[in-house]
Amino acid sequence: MSISRRQFVAGSTASLVGLTSRNALPRALIADGEPWYATMRRCGQLNLNERDALTLDVAGWIAYWASLELDALLLNGGGIVAFYPTAIPYHHKSAYLGSRDLFGELVTAATARSMRVVARMDCNYAYEDALQAHPEWFERNQDGAPRRHNESTWLFRTCMFSPYFSEQMPAIYREINERYQVAGFFTNGWPSTGALSVCYCENCQQVFRAKVGGVPPQQTDATSPLYRKYYDVYMDRVLEIWRQWQAVVTERGRASVYVGNLGGGIRTVKNVRRLGEVAAWFNADHQGRSGDTPIWDCAQQGRVAQAVMSGRTITNVTGSYANSRITWRHVAKPAAETILWMAQTTASGMVPWFHWLGGAPEDNRWRAVGRDFYRWLAQHEPHFRNRRSIASLAVLYPQRTIAFYRSGEPAGGSSEYLQGLYYALLDGRFLFDFVHEDAIGPETARRYQALLLPNAAYLDDEHCQRIREYVGAGGSLLATFETSRYTGWGDARRDFGLADVFGVTAVGETIGPLPNSYMRIEQRPHAIFAGFEGTALLPGPENRVPIRAGGNHSAPLTVVPNYPAFPPEMVFPRTPQTNEPAAVLREQGGARVAYFAGDIDRSFWRSGNPDLAQLLQNTVRWLLRDAPAPVSIAGDGIVEAFAWETEPGYALHVLNYTNPNMTRAFVRRFYPIGAQHVRFAVAPGRRISAVRALRAGQALRFGQQGAIVEFDIPSVVYYEVVALT
């Protein structure tokens, strides 16, 4: 570095304002045994802008955050802009800071109110003076031009493979650690879970020459062998930097932590399982939804994070501002939308992180929303200390398929299979967890009766073998469409990688998209056809793989091929009956296997046809042999449920999605649903003494026979948590 540690310490300490003593932390902030962030349950963030250094009311802001009973507060430290008198060359100090140490003032005030401070950093951009002095720090286009920010054009994008990440950012972390009692560092926007970018700077060209074997390509294309090598090199660099930064922030022996930005949702490209290997704390910067995103998008984020963190700390950011498709940073989104987003955060086992941008808001409608929800959380905190999920049904999170499948599809298209299955499970009121494809193992068979694969088209041989072993151990399986038809990078196999498990052989290329095709019911009675007594036909999927069933496996549904839907005179089947299976059911030992040749999950998501949802639900019940679920909830409305074993006992979280804005932002008001009858299985020998609805604030009448506890939730407005102790 251009400044030594000795020079930094000698040259900067005297100029500090509001310096906090290393031993000044209140006793309440000292971690005992486990890391402090492992027990954190409420987190907040004030995201400063550069001008806030002029007039920010430190006392007023800290009083507000303290009123939320926060465990941790995120405050801007540096990176793009330093909010303290930095001595690091080319670390841009706020132009409005003057002699003030705003960050130091905030740290001192927050610490005095028993809130830990995490320094919010930005490693992604720097100013032109840094570009002139260190051109090697910055990303380049193919023509060699540095990459400007598309709005703030005076900022230039830094390169992850450059010394900016391995030298400049560690120097800033060390400076802040020397001066202030911070408990951690968070980087905005990095590494994220989105698509990889390709940089053409000299550092990256050297990486390609030495580690990839070629030159940076014009675009990221998973069918390219060059891109596949680059993906692994890129992930290795992310983990290398993550580990380095974690080591830097703990050099002084503190219980500090580095936290990366890992938002958001189910549409991920970077391998979240690998990121989970280094993340002591997983932060999903998944602040809200826009357009036609379904309301359960936040709960899905929780399921993804739970699938890779094995019980370690997970937070999710709720943006209190209007982060819609048209973004308004300084006006609040509707209170109902914000509240339901935070409710999904806590229901799915994440810790809420409430966020506002700008130190002088003129719209303050968001303040009471956060305060009321957080105070309620604090009042009932023990019931949000989860030990384990008690779901017995698992849905595979097929990350490679979501990341790389059919790269020409519109954005989000590869997640529609999972989305359709998800909606069907919510409609059927199933309790379930996500399992990441890289995490399938013996524990999967011990925990889950059935595993559902929504078109997991891209699976490596190792994944196929683990699924095969799961079925061999007695786990039941549902798979759809092209599951296992390709390797993890999308190279086509001659047949399904799981052909032996499905009991089928692919006999041709994928057919579709074709509307107005059908599935003919061939086998009655059968459990998967419950509720279809009045019809011989069911709506067919838009796409299918032509298959042949092996052995004596049951094919209760056959394909009725597509025929014209217009004009009416032409609407009749040319081939009303075939021997081509639309689904194959088989039993293997104690396991049941159901394979659907078509994309019925995606077709349901796109059409909303309830027959497809009911067929999926019936099939899941058949897989489970109609065994009683750990939790069942009977009543009207669309709900999502999570059930946890907690420190005091058990907690059932019920989210009410019954709303005209369920699949389009924003929710503006709630539509309460009536009584919900719950049947809850507790551990054998466990006696429940009280059942209480925490949102309603009332004790519920209940009965217990053996391990089964039954009670009614009188109503759910938007969210209810029932504690069983």
Image (cartoon, grey):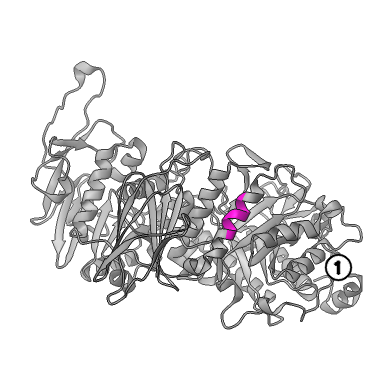
What residue span does the magenta drawing correspond to? 369-375
- Residue wearing tag 1: 87
Q: Is residue 480 above or below residue 722?
A: above
Residue 499 vs residue 118: left or right?
left
Q: Residues within 10 Å of mark 1 (few under 14, many from 20)?
A: many
Residue 50 vs residue 211: left or right?
right
Q: Name the quadrant containing residue 278.
A: bottom right
Residue drawn at the location 12% of the way across and 47% of the way down: 556
Residue 586 vs residue 60: left or right?
left
Look at label 1 and name its amino acid: Ala
The foreground one among 706 and 37 is: 706
Where's the C terminus, which quadrant?
Answer: bottom left
* Residue 385 appearing in the image: yes
Residue drawn at the location 54% of the way across and 44% of the way down: 336
User: Element at badge 1?
Assistant: loop
Q: Is residue 534 above or below residue 485?
A: above
